[in-house]
Image (cartoon, rainbow, N blue to C red):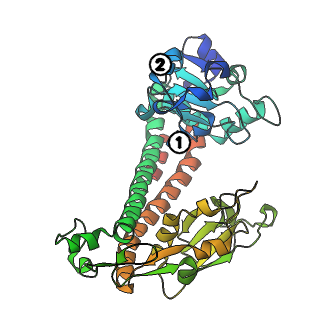
């Protein structure tokens, strides 16, 4: 595209020409913790703002009355939210979709609203997500210990805008990849929920046993698997359990081994995930444990259970699981999650999970035939999740490699479309 078809402007110039507006979220004096309610109108705080997306897991709510009082902060699709403060959050921005239209911009955010037919909000959002823009915001944030972004800073932020038709085409191409990543992630979340529901139905609520006792055929249980379930219960120290099953301790079904220290300065560039108590915390060129595996948080986010499909390196804030007596990792993973081990972590300044305490927790162990049947079903779901994870990683890497050159005009749309078409 000829350079004459592109223009460099600041957000301030767009605002002064009536093409956009900025609005800082309500001040602390307008919104208090006491205004939060269990269910109502969602607020979008700093911690909910990710890379172009809003994290649903951290959305507080306020009543309809409070929302009406803060009506100038209502969000609509196409609005862009900047995180206002925080070392990790500064530089991040997210576009509001139909999913969050009608929510409120919270105290820790600034809203950008584009109102010109010559500027595409989705394109602007992609531009703001580039390393170039993120680093610019970080570099111009006010304050060292707690960086803070305000409207004055954002007004100086530069944008490079091609003709609007080109903006829409670029945003559409990049959006296709984001949408595929979102769909894959939604499928994975549903598969995870399904796997947990299957475990609880078979091994916690004993639904097939109850159905067989009552002379019913349960929904969704293959007949050959249904034949493996008992039709009677017997007493145990945990209450009634299916006949032929037994109570076992965590220490009987697996060994919890300590991870190994691997400070950031000692890590070498590589593709092996480094696992901490809250999941992946980095990458290394060598594994400590062959995958697939299970990591349990020992310090910090103690008790958290993380599945790892590849070889991995668990650090010293974790345990990793070694199965005993041919117990399938799939069943152990779900059983440990169901135990909610985080409830057994100490309540010191840095919560910790004691290994002896974890080993003493009790589970109900089914016969080997049912373990194998569950493992077959669970692993088929896990295989699809792993496929989606790999595809998402490929798409994210491609998107991130294209986004800068494409938005700056260094890469043509045709070449970018060919690259995207090869993986979608």
Q: Secondary structure at mark 2?
A: helix
Residue under the image location 56 percent in, 76 percent down: 291
Q: Residue furthest bottom?
A: 325
Q: Position of residue 107 (x, y in %)?
A: 63, 26
**Left or right for 262, reference 419:** right
Residue position marked by numbered label 2 in the rendering: 65
Q: Is residue 183 above or below residue 380?
A: above
**Left or right for 246, reference 220:** right
Of residues 74 and 385, the one nearer the viewer is 74
Give the number of the disc on residue 76. Answer: none
Residue under the image location 63 percent in, 58 percent down: 278
Residue position marked by numbered label 1 in the rendering: 55
Of residues 9 and 140, the one nearer the viewer is 140
Of residues 167 and 23, the one nearer the viewer is 23
Q: Quadrant of residue 39?
A: top left
Q: Is residue 412 above or below residue 105?
A: below
Does the image show residue 417? no
Q: Position of residue 52 (x, y in %)?
A: 54, 38
Residue under the image location 51 percent in, 65 percent down: 337
Q: Position of residue 227 (x, y in %)?
A: 23, 81
């Amino acid at each position: 595209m000829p350079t004459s078809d592109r223009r460099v402007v600041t957000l301030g110039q767009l605002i002064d020409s009536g093409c956009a507006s900025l609005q800082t979220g309500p001040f602390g004096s307008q919104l208090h913790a006491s205004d939060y309610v269990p269910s109502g109108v969602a607020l979008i705080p700093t911690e909910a703002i990710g890379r172009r997306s809003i994290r649903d897991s951290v959305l507080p709510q306020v009543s309809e009355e409070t929302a009406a009082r803060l009506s100038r902060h209502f969000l609509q699709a196409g609005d862009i939210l900047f995180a206002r403060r925080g070392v990790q959050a500064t530089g991040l921005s997210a576009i509001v979709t139909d999913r969050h239209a009608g929510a409120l911009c919270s105290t820790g955010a600034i809203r950008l609203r584009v109102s010109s037919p010559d500027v595409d909000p989705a394109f602007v959002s992609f531009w703001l997500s580039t390393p170039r823009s993120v680093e610019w915001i970080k570099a111009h944030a006010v304050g060292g210990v707690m960086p803070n972004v305000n409207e004055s800073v954002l007004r100086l932020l530069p944008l490079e805008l091609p003709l609007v038709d080109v903006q829409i085409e670029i945003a559409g191409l990049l959006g296709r990849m984001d949408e595929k990543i979102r769909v894959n992630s939604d499928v994975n979340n549903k598969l995870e929920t399904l796997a947990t529901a299957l475990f609880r139905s078979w091994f916690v609520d004993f639904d097939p046993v109850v159905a067989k006792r009552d002379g019913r055929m349960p929904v969704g249980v293959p007949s050959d698997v249904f034949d493996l379930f008992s039709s009677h219960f017997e007493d145990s120290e945990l209450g009634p359990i299916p006949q032929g099953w037994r109570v076992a301790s965590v220490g009987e079904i697996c060994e919890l081994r300590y991870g190994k220290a691997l400070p950031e300065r000692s890590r070498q560039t590589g593709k092996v995930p480094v696992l901490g108590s809250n999941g992946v915390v980095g990458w290394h060129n060598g594994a400590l444990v062959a995958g697939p595996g299970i990591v349990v948080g020992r310090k910090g986010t103690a008790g958290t259970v993380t599945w790892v499909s590849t070889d991995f390196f668990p650090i010293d804030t974790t345990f990793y699981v070694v199965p005993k007596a041919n117990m399938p990792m799939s069943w152990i993973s779900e059983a440990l999650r169901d135990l909610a081990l985080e409830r057994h972590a100490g309540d010191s300044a840095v919560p910790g999970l004691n290994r002896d305490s974890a080993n003493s927790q009790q589970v109900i162990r089914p016969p080997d035939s049912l373990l194998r049947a569950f493992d077959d079903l669970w692993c088929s779901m896990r295989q699809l999740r792993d496929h989606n994870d790999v595809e998402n990683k490929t798409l994210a890497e491609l998107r991130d490699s294209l986004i800068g050159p494409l938005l700056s005009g260094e890469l043509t749309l045709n070449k970018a479309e060919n690259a995207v078409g090869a993986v979608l």
